[in-house]
Image: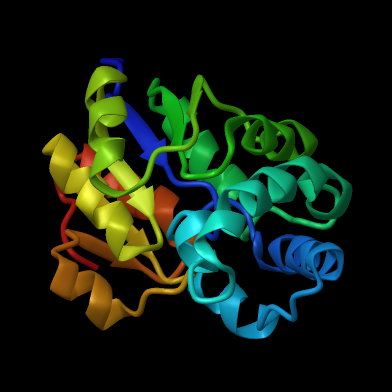
Amino acid sequence: MTQAPGVGFDLDLTLIDTAPGFGAVLEALGDELGVAFPVAEMVTRLGPPLDQMLVPHLEPERIGPAVDRFRVIYPDHAITTVPALPGAVDAIAAVRRAGGRVVVVTGKFTPNAQLHLAHLGLDHDHLAGEVWGVGKGDVLRREGCSIYVGDHVHDVEGAHAAGILSVSVLTGGSTREELLDAGTDVVLDDLTRFPRWYADHLAGAGGPV
């Protein structure tokens, strides 16, 4: 069988349900800083880098140290409580069966992303953390990916920056309409739909869903 090209996957809200863990870390950080973060609201807007999310809630000089502290306390609150999303394991297995490489490209702090992947046993060939939006394009090109799967409009930007197919799932903070407006090529309800779509795509029948 001819080896399939690599497939890139976003991590948060694409492969894993980060929301409960992220919220728990925000609560702990807020307690340390004496700040009442609107956690319920913030976990619905995951995607942008943490420093951008903190801008409305902290003075500029406090944001950098807060991000550093968030990363330090993250493993204590957000690894064992965060599950893989439905279909994540099967989606990775589908790429493996086709002989493709699995590349995880995420904005998350790399050591914490690795903890998630190891805890959940999510098989992958390469992890690139701390990249966001169009910055993901360089990694996807370098790793030979032909598809990037994500949940956010900025994941669509990353795929476009790499000149590859954008596949979006509706498990994150972006709606179908927002993803289509951003120019995604394919929208799937979740990763349980990915293996069938991927098989059809490799057979030459792939298209918008």
Which residue is at the front of the view, 39 or 137? Answer: 39
**Residue 148 relative to residue 34: left or right:** left
- Residue 81: horizontal and vertical position, in percent? 83, 57
Which residue is at the front of the view, 159 or 99? Answer: 159
> Which residue lies at the image location 78% right of the left edge and 62% below the top edge?
29
Q: Is residue 108 above or below residue 19?
A: above
Image-quadrant location for residue 102: top left
**Residue 31 relative to residue 65: left or right:** right
> Which residue lies at the image location 50% right of the left edge and 61% below the top edge?
60
Q: Quadrant of the C terminus?
A: bottom left
**Residue 15 relative to residue 205: left or right:** right
Which residue is at the front of the view, 98 or 139? Answer: 139
Q: Which coloring applies here?
A: rainbow
> Which residue lies at the image location 36% right of the left edge and 49% below the top edge?
149
> Which residue lies at the image location 55% right of the left edge and 67% below the top edge?
59
Q: Quadrant of the N terminus?
A: top left
Count the numbered circles shown: 0
- Residue 138: horizontal and vertical position, in percent? 24, 28
**Residue 71 relative to residue 123: left or right:** right
Which residue is at the front of the view, 75 or 199? Answer: 75
Q: Is residue 202 above or below residue 165?
A: above
- Residue 78: horizontal and vertical position, in percent? 79, 53
- Residue 119: horizontal and vertical position, in percent? 79, 37
